[in-house]
Amino acid sequence: MTKKRSALGRGLGALLSDSDEQNNPKSVEAVVAPAKAGIDEISLDEIESNPFQPRTDFNQEALNELADSIKVQGIIQPITVRQLSEGKYQLISGERRFTASKIAGLVAIPAYIRTANDQQMLEMALIENIQRENLNAIEIALSYQRLIAECELKQEELGDRVGKNRTTINNYLRLLKLPPDVQVGVRDGKISMGHARALITLENVDLQLDIYRKTVNNDLSVRQVEVLVRNIGKDSKVATKQPEPSELNYEIKKLQDKISSHFGSKIAIKANDQNKGEIKIPFNSADDLNRILDLLNL
């Protein structure tokens, strides 16, 4: 059997196939044409939500509209679950359909039953989300970051999974280096990814925040922000630039960038010749501090 590569790369379908093949190595046909593992009607009460679901904020109005459609048309596309035990299942993909079915008053829902471990569950949930949900740029960036960090994917492998080139993935990941306030602005649609990419070229957090506020308050276009950033770079490029210790070697600089990306804020690492120093993690509000503490599992 010849397999075609889909326009979205390997994606969710390939991951589901991988997990099935591992448990049924005899036949690929069992994956492609799911005869025995086909569609079952499962009670909604027997299904629990996906703990690896990367997105928890669903538009209530859109859910109600989907529920109304389900009342009339039924479930057109089955959800996908894994069986935990007898009469107990866990959602892999289809969170919106699952929730809307509850709103619509359904008792049972058609579902594919697959086999997947926790890492596959996370990978499937993230990729399904990226491909099927109308995510904002920050949500996409966070999903990419989790796939790289938690699923141990290289950028090339990630590009294969989601059908994106490495440059596109890197452009999204760079957004996570912006200050939290700017990231929230992108998430909430106050500025576009184009605005955010222009701000990334500034290394000073205060300047980034200043131009961000001007952009929002004056409804500046991406082109206007690019010009503003370029002019600031010419006139006062280093006047307010946060100093970096001269002894910061290449490895520590890489570590600083990696930690900054993880926390979504500019982390400063100072080190001397004896490799002694300190790490500073700035925060802008109580909510921002709590976000950082959550990342630290404290």
Image: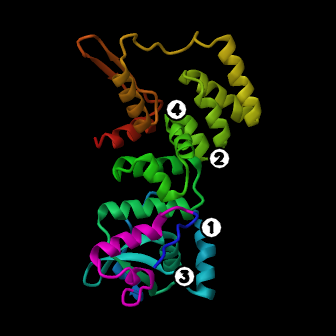
* Residue annotated with mark 1: 61
Q: Quadrant of the N terminus?
A: bottom left
Image location of residue 112, percent across then percent down: 42, 81
* Residue annotated with mark 2: 189
Above or below, 153 against 250 in this view is below
Q: Which residues are magenta?
A: 8-37
Query: What number is the disc on residue 179?
Result: 4
* Residue annotated with mark 3: 104
Q: Which residue is painted at 41% across and 52% down in the image? A: 147
How far, Cα to Cα, is label 4 from label 3? 41 Å
Which label's residue is closer to the chain start, 1 or 4? 1
Image location of residue 237, percent across then percent down: 62, 13
Callout 4 amino acid? Pro
Which label's residue is closer to the chain start, 2 or 4? 4
Q: SS at mark 3? A: loop
Residue 11 falls within the magenta-colored stretch: yes
Residue 154 falls within the magenta-colored stretch: no
Q: SS at mark 4? A: loop
Which label's residue is closer to the chain start, 1 or 2? 1
Nearest the eye: 223 or 298 = 223
